[in-house]
Image (spheres, rainbow, N blue to C red):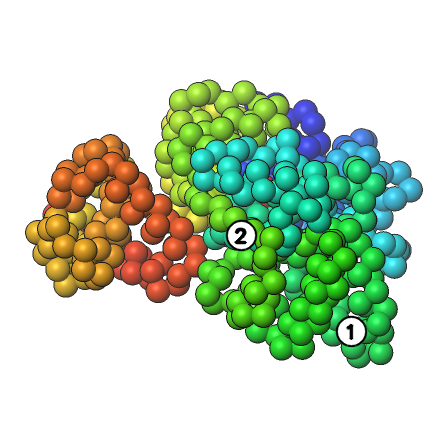
């Protein structure tokens, strides 16, 4: 694969960088960047704000430089530019931070930070499947008829399943219609409010939020614990709601853990709607990979798509990570995109615990049972006792994730259960894993104990 487009080169670089920097750093600084231009020896990276440009320049230029240089196999200078539109904002908008001299300060911190939207996150690029159809339909309805369809619309799911994508897609859509919108993370909303409070500008703050047609607040769970901001959010919410302005909220946590979304707030939800996004099923995972390959203009063999879709956990962010990583490896080692390479790419993926290709299903059932102080027969029994049902769901999850058994076979292993029961059990655990640290710990321990068993019997 020859890297031609700056965009493609940068996606490849992101795949590598994802492995080298912490998840937090990646998500905060690198995730929403694009490769814009490569002319002469300058490689220009588009970033969402001057602040991100400054931070990347200060903290990450050496590693970015090293990575890109290896991919392009030539000396380059890195420039960052604040851009929202892919490949559009350049020229005098460029901040021209030189990688090697790193001397030029960021000139225009005060420049408005664009519209804060990722251009990639549109309805067009959103793959609709069983798991997100409802949320997608609600988002489209709201975008077409803001303030009238469902107000507020609350999207919720575990991480990496498309909430932010849908929020941005709504924003792009209403923006094209000439409506005023504001997209903020709950954290930003809180910070904004706190500084308004400090500087005696609360009225101004409220006016700013009152004067928009569509307010999109991402990751509301970050407001949840903060009394003052919660109060303000509630008033702002009321103002807007009374004026039939559209409000869209995303939440990463279970609603019951969010006092904000309960009581007073939820009692206003009349006319509102909560839509949940579930982890994507196999078909949707395949469709997402196919779309991603198209977007990046690389030909990926069908068997490779199938393989990744089967192997990668049901979180779209991780699917994208695996895919980027595969492209990076293919590029770096000059190998074609084969099944073999895909399995290497996935084996090393940091988010994937290394799983043996052939876990023994019987062993999984026994190990899970033992871990929860039960027997295999307990798992197969008809009972719905809570602790047994939970262990059974964990077993279903592991059997589906770590073996190649069909749903029907897994159903048999767990006591003549139907395939939809297995699927539901699996999806429940997959979903809760996003939210529940205790469950993640349990699963890790079960897998460890499976590994130990195997190394003894090997
Ligand atoms: P969340 O906000 O729920 O944590 P994001 O919206 O950030 O998740 O999604 C994570 C990544 O997965 C993004 O790059 C996004 O574009 C992609 N993604 C999520 N859902 C879809 C989808 N249905 N089709 C295409 N890409 C998706
Ligand atoms: Mg998000």
Q: How many marks?
A: 2
Q: Are marks 1 and 2 in contact (CB under 8 Å)?
A: no
Q: Nearer the viewer, residue 184 or 146?
A: 146
Is ligand 1 less than 8 Å from the beta carbon at label 2? no
Residue 35 spot, x, y in % from top left: 71, 37
Which quadrant of the frame does ligand 1 lie within?
A: top right
Q: Earlier in the sequence, mark 1 or mark 2?
A: 1
Q: In the drawing, does residue 370 fall left or right of residue 106?
A: left
Query: Residue shown at 74%/74% (left/top)?
Result: 194
Q: In the drawing, does residue 147 fall left or right of residue 454?
A: right
Residue 272 spot, x, y in % from top left: 59, 53
Element type at marker 1?
helix
Q: Nearer the viewer, residue 102 or 407?
A: 407
Residue tagged by mark 2?
274
Q: In the drawing, does residue 93 fall left or right of residue 47?
A: right
- How many neighbours does mark 1 have within 10 angstroms: few (below 14), some (14-19), or many (20 or more)? few
Query: On the image, which quarter does residue 75 sit in?
Result: top right
The quadrant of the rendering that contains the C terminus is: top left
Query: Residue shown at 70%/65% (left/top)?
Result: 238
Residue farthest to the right? 92
Query: Residue shown at 42%/30% (left/top)?
Result: 283
The quadrant of the rendering that contains the N terminus is: top right
Query: Residue shown at 75%/64% (left/top)?
Result: 239
Q: Nearer the viewer, residue 430 or 27?
A: 430
Q: Calculate the distance from the C-alpha at mark 1 to the C-alpha at mark 2.
A: 31 Å
* Residue 351 visible somewhere in the drawing: yes
Element type at marker 2?
strand
Q: Which dot marks residue 167?
A: none
Residue tagged by mark 1?
195
Is ligand 2 less than 8 Å from the beta carbon at label 1? no
* Residue 60 visible somewhere in the drawing: no
- How many neighbours does mark 2 have within 10 angstroms: few (below 14), some (14-19), or many (20 or more)? some
């Amino acid at each position: 694969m020859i890297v031609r487009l700056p965009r493609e080169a940068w996606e490849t670089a992101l795949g590598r960088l994802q492995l080298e920097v912490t998840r937090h750093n990646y998500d905060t600084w690198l995730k929403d960047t694009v490769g814009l231009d490569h002319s002469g020896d300058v490689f220009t990276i588009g970033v969402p704000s001057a602040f991100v440009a400054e931070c990347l320049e200060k903290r990450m230029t050496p590693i970015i430089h090293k990575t890109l240089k290896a991919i392009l196999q030539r000396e380059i200078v890195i420039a960052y530019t604040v851009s929202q539109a892919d490949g559009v904002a350049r020229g005098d908008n460029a901040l021209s931070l030189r990688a090697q001299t790193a001397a030029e300060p960021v000139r225009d911190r005060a420049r408005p930070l664009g519209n804060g939207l990722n251009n990639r996150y549109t309805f067009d690029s959103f793959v609709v499947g069983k798991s997100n159809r409802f949320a997608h339909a609600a988002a489209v309805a709201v975008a077409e008829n803001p303030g009238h369809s469902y107000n507020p619309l609350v999207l919720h799911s575990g991480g990496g399943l498309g909430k932010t994508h849908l929020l941005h897609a709504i924003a792009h859509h209403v923006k094209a219609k000439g409506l005023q919108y504001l997209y903020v993370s709950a954290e930003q909303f809180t910070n904004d409010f706190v500084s308004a409070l400090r500087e005696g500008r609360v009225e101004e703050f409220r006016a700013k939020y009152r004067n928009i047609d569509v307010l999109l607040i991402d990751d509301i769970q970050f407001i949840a614990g903060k009394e003052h901001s919660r109060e303000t959010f509630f008033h702002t919410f009321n103002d807007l709601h009374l004026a039939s302005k559209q409000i869209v909220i995303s939440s990463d946590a279970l609603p019951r853990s969010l006092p904000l979304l309960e009581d007073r707030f939820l009692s206003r939800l009349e006319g509102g709607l909560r839509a949940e996004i579930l982890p994507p099923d196999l078909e949707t995972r395949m469709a997402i990979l196919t779309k991603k390959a198209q977007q990046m203009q690389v030909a990926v063999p069908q068997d490779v798509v199938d393989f990744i879709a089967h192997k990668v956990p049901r979180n779209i962010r991780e699917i994208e990570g695996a895919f980027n990583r595969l492209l990076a490896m293919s590029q770096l080692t000059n190998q074609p995109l084969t099944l073999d390479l895909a399995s290497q790419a996935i084996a090393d993926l940091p988010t994937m615990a290394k799983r043996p290709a052939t876990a023994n299903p019987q062993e999984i059932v026994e190990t899970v049972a033992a871990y929860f102080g039960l027997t295999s027969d307990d798992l197969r029994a008809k009972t719905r006792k809570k602790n047994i049902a939970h262990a059974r769901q964990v077993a279903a999850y592991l059997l589906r994730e770590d073996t190649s058994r069909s749903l029907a076979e897994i159903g048999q292993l767990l006591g003549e259960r139907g395939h939809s029961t297995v699927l539901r059990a699996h999806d429940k655990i997959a979903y809760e894993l996003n939210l529940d640290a205790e469950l993640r710990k349990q699963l890790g321990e079960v897998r460890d104990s499976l590994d130990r068993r195997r190394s003894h019997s090997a």
